[in-house]
Amino acid sequence: MSTSEAIEISKAVASQLTSASQAGFLGGFSFIAKHSMLPRREFEDLKSLLVDVSTRGDTRSFASRKRTQHDYVIQVYVRKHIDKEDSLVAEELVRVAEAIADYWERTDSDTGQTRTLTGRDEKLISPIETQFSEGTLQTHRVMASTILLTFRGWR
């Protein structure tokens, strides 16, 4: 497994999130998800909702002599600067992160089918992990949530 394959999955996740958002499948929230190797942004960029997708890791284990199992961890990072302690904006951003997580859980577990992101079979394995960063909210007034998606593939 090369890094390029993990990046390819990350780009496919960003593309699917953007398509789902534009089609209204994410609770009415509209955004453009961008693939980023290092999801760093300037403070000015944080005035609008940002959704960055990046690779976080690849865990390998041997399934047999000729096959290796890969668990690719993809990070979806949702952020926005909050001008004041506005609980409505904060709640809305939490709902965006929940809508993203629900979209991935619903699509795979309801159909029971393998999702093809890159022309190969990568199966989303559960559970989907969502993390909320309270430190950035208190320190920088930036609401940030991270959704971790783990895809399993074999090579």
Image (cartoon, rainbow, N blue to C red):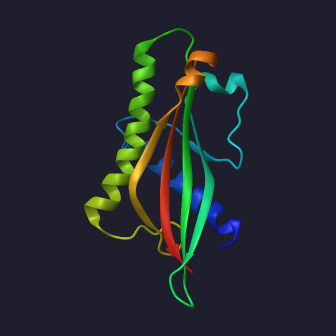
**Rendered-image quadrant of the N terminus:** bottom right
Question: Would you identify the image quadrant in which residue 51 lies?
Answer: top right
Q: Residue at x 63, y 25 (%)?
A: 46
Residue 4: image location, x then y, percent: 69, 66
* Rendered view: 120 above or below 43: below
Q: Nearer the viewer, residue 132 or 106?
A: 132
Residue 146 horizontal side relative to residue 113, left or right: right
Q: Residue at x 67, y 27 (%)?
A: 45
Q: Residue at x 60, y 24 (%)?
A: 136
Question: Would you identify the image quadrant in which residue 59 lies?
Answer: bottom right
Residue 61 horizontal side relative to residue 22, left or right: right
Q: Residue at x 50, y 82 (%)?
A: 63
* Rendered view: 90 above or below 153: above
Q: Outermost residue, top direction?
A: 84
Residue 7: image location, x then y, percent: 65, 60
**Rendered-image quadrant of the C terminus:** bottom right
Residue 50: image location, x then y, percent: 58, 34
Residue 21: image location, x then y, percent: 44, 43
For the question of whether residue 81 can be seen, the reply is no
Residue 34 horizontal side relative to residue 117, left or right: right
**How many numbered discs sit on the rendered protein?**
0
* Rendered view: 81 above or below 25: above
For the question of whether residue 102 can be seen, the reply is yes
Q: Outermost residue, bottom direction?
A: 65
